[in-house]
Amino acid sequence: MAFGVYSLIICCVAVLVIYLWRSSQTFRFYTKYCYYYANMQLLAFLLVLPSLLTPGDPVNIRYFQVLANYTFKLIGITVEKRNTEELENLNKPAILLVNHQDTVDIISLMTVTPYRATFLAKKQILYWGYFGLTAWLNGFVFIDRLNPEKARGTMKRVVNIIQERKIKLWIFPEGTRNMKGDMLPFKKGAFHLAIQAQVPIYPLVLSSYRYFLDPDKKIFNKGKVIASCLPPFETKDLTSEDVNGLLDKVRSAMQAEFKKISMEMEERAEIAGNSLLVE
């Protein structure tokens, strides 16, 4: 009797979930984000033990990368890679720049992240449960953005890490998430790092998400992202006096590419029926 009642309840819940998924864009929006964050925490939990074998080594991100590229497929974001071969096979230290739109940027980045690459991240991530622990075990470089003096000290340490451990460091030069259809002004930190460490800058540009993701309207449909890697910018023989010029060149190139590939996605959306859905 009890089994029959439980079975009926499960069936009713399943029918309700299917109905809401098909009929409510708000339900789909929150369900996808819940799955995304739950999946991040689950993967982080599963990777704690393997990462303890080599704590703090960026090579550990490989474990997360392999699992994430499979489990994130359920969210419905596909990535079209362009000119990423050199980036994916990069075997020298470098600064990797990418525009920052949303937390789901990780989905695209995991498809192109090279061996021994890690992230420059805000210190608060350390307190994000298992993800924070695994981030530390994966060699994330944390900065305290609320304490500029400490942040400057961290930057000096990061230069040594890049040079001595030959790592590649992902940095979001805008410093915060932005889905306004344009890029925010870039912070100078990444460019100071690249020049002080005398390593090249590899810019990666992700096309706009706004054709399938709109947090204000609670829309999160299936979609495609173009991940386009630009030619590297060398920093050899540059000094701190060249920071502003280098920043302007890199931002102009990334901005132009962002507009180009975002316009392409907009045209595809119009062909698909002028909706947010981009197959």
Image (cartoon, rainbow, N blue to C red):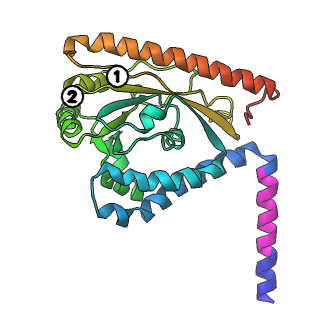
Q: Give the numbered dot on residue 132.
A: none
* Identity of the residue drawn at 76% across and 59% down: 17
Mark 1: give few (<14), some (14-19) or many (20+) Cα within 10 Å.
few
- The C terminus lies in which quarter of the figure? top right
Q: Identify which amino acid the numbered label 2 is placed on.
A: Ala
- The N terminus lies in which quarter of the figure? bottom right
Pair 2/1: label in front? 2
Quadrant of res 142: top left
Quadrant of res 199: top left
Left or right, 43 with respect to 248, comes to right
On the question of residue 93 being in view, the answer is yes
Q: Position of residue 201 (x, y in %)?
A: 34, 25
Count of numbered circles on the image: 2
Let me know if residue 223 is in the magenta part: no
Mark 2: give few (<14), some (14-19) or many (20+) Cα within 10 Å.
many
Q: Which residues are magenta?
A: 9-21
Q: Earlier in the sequence, mark 2 or mark 1?
A: 1
Q: Position of residue 114 (x, y in %)?
A: 40, 41
Left or right, 52 with respect to 108, comes to left
Residue situated in front as seen by the camera: 196 or 130: 196
- As drawn, 250 above or below 112: above
Residue situated in front as seen by the camera: 158 or 41: 158
* Identity of the residue drawn at 30% across and 63% down: 52
User: Circle 2 is placed at which residue position?
Assistant: 197
Residue situated in front as seen by the camera: 157 or 130: 157
- As drawn, 67 above or below 108: below
- Secondary structure at badge 1 equals loop
The residues tagged by marks 2 and 1 sit, at their Cα atoms, a distance apart of 17 Å
User: Circle 1 is placed at which residue position?
Assistant: 187
Q: Identify which amino acid the numbered label 1 is placed on.
A: Lys
